[in-house]
Image (cartoon, rainbow, N blue to C red):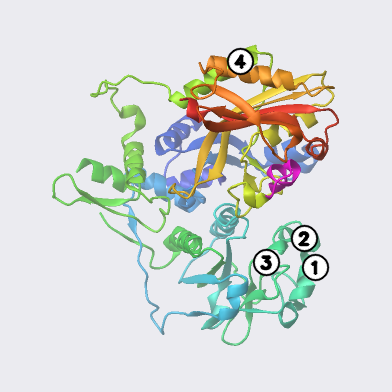
Amino acid sequence: MPTVGIKRDLLFKALGRTYTDEEFDELCFEFGLELDEITSEKEIVSREQGDTKASDASDVILYKIDVPANRYDLLCLEGLVRGLQVFKNKLEAPRYRRISPVNGDPQKLIITKETAAVRPFAVAAVLRNITFTQERYDSFIELQEKLHQNICRKRSLVAIGTHDLDTISGPFTYTAKPPGDISFKPLNQTKEYTATELMSLYKTDSHLRHYLHIIEDKPVYPIIYDSNGIVLSMPPIINGNHSKITLQTKNVFIECTATDLTKAKIVLDMMVTMFSEYCSQPFTESTEKIAQLLTRMCLLSRATGVGDEIEVEIPPTRSDVIHACDIMEDAAIAYGFNNITRTTPRAYTVANQFPLNKLTELLRQDLAAAGFTEALNFALCSEEDIADKLGKKISETRAAHISNPKTAEFQVARTTLLPGLLKTIAANRKMPLPLKLFEVSDVVLKDETKDVGARNSRRFCAVYYNKSPGFEVIHGLLDRTMQLLEVKSARGEGYHIQAADDSTFFPGRCAEIIVCGKTVGRLGVLHPDVINRFELTMPCSAMEIDIEPFL
């Protein structure tokens, strides 16, 4: 959950009254927030950098408030105060509308086809006749940074640019050019740089260097010009110095460039709606029980008169509302969870544990009693773990791939539990031998018959690592498992094993596990190459079976 730091005195001034810490904590709880910490800038600096550095820091009290990850409208003082005031019935829920400029046509942002190679989408808006104070300006800049770190995913999905409209002239052009053809004076610099020079300049910048990789390797860089050829910004890196915003700025041009159009629209809505109250023409306001509750949550509602039907208007600030369930959650928050009467359910039902989970729990207990230690591993792994290291091809694994993996360690959802156990052994090689581990958990397999294109499958995997392969130990564990599952050792209606070939196992030391005529798993001695790829030095036997057929 994002945490918003708000100056207590500014917050109370905006709310129109003061609260004790306990009263404000209770108000946050009622509204679905959490007052995480009461601190000050001086205390934070002292804790992180020492008392010497904190000597010049401010003593102003800060409230650190945890905000739900999907409530982008609460990431700044303005949105938080507006939400609380509406919730407490001290302010009517605002209705937002676009206002045409008094003189001239609306501004235009022209998007050229060249942007498709780097950041294909852009949206824009203008805040007219806005009045900034230092506190409002700081909040404006801080909201941009909060959005960049959250929904914008560190500018990789969306980048926000804000400009003094009175210093530039439209229509504006969003295009893309080779870095050598771009030259302008960036924000807070005194001379012009080419885009190539800027990338070198900002490699040592503690703030901007984290965003360079987004476009660094692209053949063209995105750039926004006004009608006179003045550069507004080179998203997602830096704005131009010519159009920078000051406290005297009256008209703000806001542009959002993106790789995701939906998120760009959400971000633009947040920037405009949060600060429209400081414009000369702010949002217009409009004025039974559930409809009134929803209106307290900034969801303008009215009873239609047709049965129990309620018409709800979703404002641009509430991008988190995507289903009727989200509306009912807000109604419950406004009513107060503590006010909901505790009642006995009208329907009589007997709760039962999910059969697959019950079987899993019973197996875990008895496998531990058999002398094996349970391990829990990540459901994501690298492509190499489930393919190359096991002597298989990635195309044969039916793996679900992550489209934007953060690291090479989390590229795919695992299709087998074996790599995780082998990596656990590799991390515990100094432990006394033998190492006997097991895991009962899910793997993910592609399945076109499912609506999401994949399904979970509950597996049981065990490994034995010692100076000798210990195949008989793993075979004995299989017999014990089948005994627990009440499956007899017999062909046909029982279980048996038969020789099989598998590149993961040593030739001639692998067998299929067949239950009632169907293959449910394999066991055997691992191939020496597999052992070496996992940085192990001793022989190892393993078994993996699908336990869902036993339900």
Image quadrant holding the N terminus, namely top right
Query: Of callouts 1 and 3, which one flags the residue occurring earlier in the amino acid sequence?
Result: 1
How far is disc 4 from disc 2 in space, using C-alphas?
61 Å
Label drawn at residue 201: 1
Residue type at mark 2: give it: Asp
Residue 350's spot in the image, x, y percent? 32, 19
Circle 4 is placed at which residue position? 480
- SS for callout 4: helix
How far is disc 3 from disc 2 in space, using C-alphas?
11 Å
Give the residues drawn in magenta, as a range.
383-393
Residue type at mark 1: give it: Leu
Q: Is residue 165 above or below residue 376?
A: below
Label drawn at residue 237: 3
Q: Nearer the viewer, mark 3 or mark 2?
A: 3
| Residues at circles 4 and 2 in contact by the CB criterion of under 8 Å | no
Res. 250 visible in picture: no
Q: Is residue 370 above or below residue 26?
A: above
Circle 2 is placed at which residue position? 205
Q: Nearer the viewer, mark 4 or mark 1?
A: 4
Q: Residue at x 38, y 67 (%)?
A: 281
Query: Of callouts 3 and 2, which one flags the residue occurring earlier in the amino acid sequence?
Result: 2
Direction from residue 27 to residue 402 in the image, left or right: right
Query: Of callouts 4 and 2, which one flags the residue occurring earlier in the amino acid sequence?
Result: 2
Q: Which class describes the residues within 10 Å of circle 1: few (<14), some (14-19), or many (20+)?
A: few
Residue type at mark 4: give it: Arg
Q: Residue at x 62, y 54 (%)?
A: 404
Q: Which class describes the residues within 10 Å of circle 2: few (<14), some (14-19), or many (20+)?
A: few
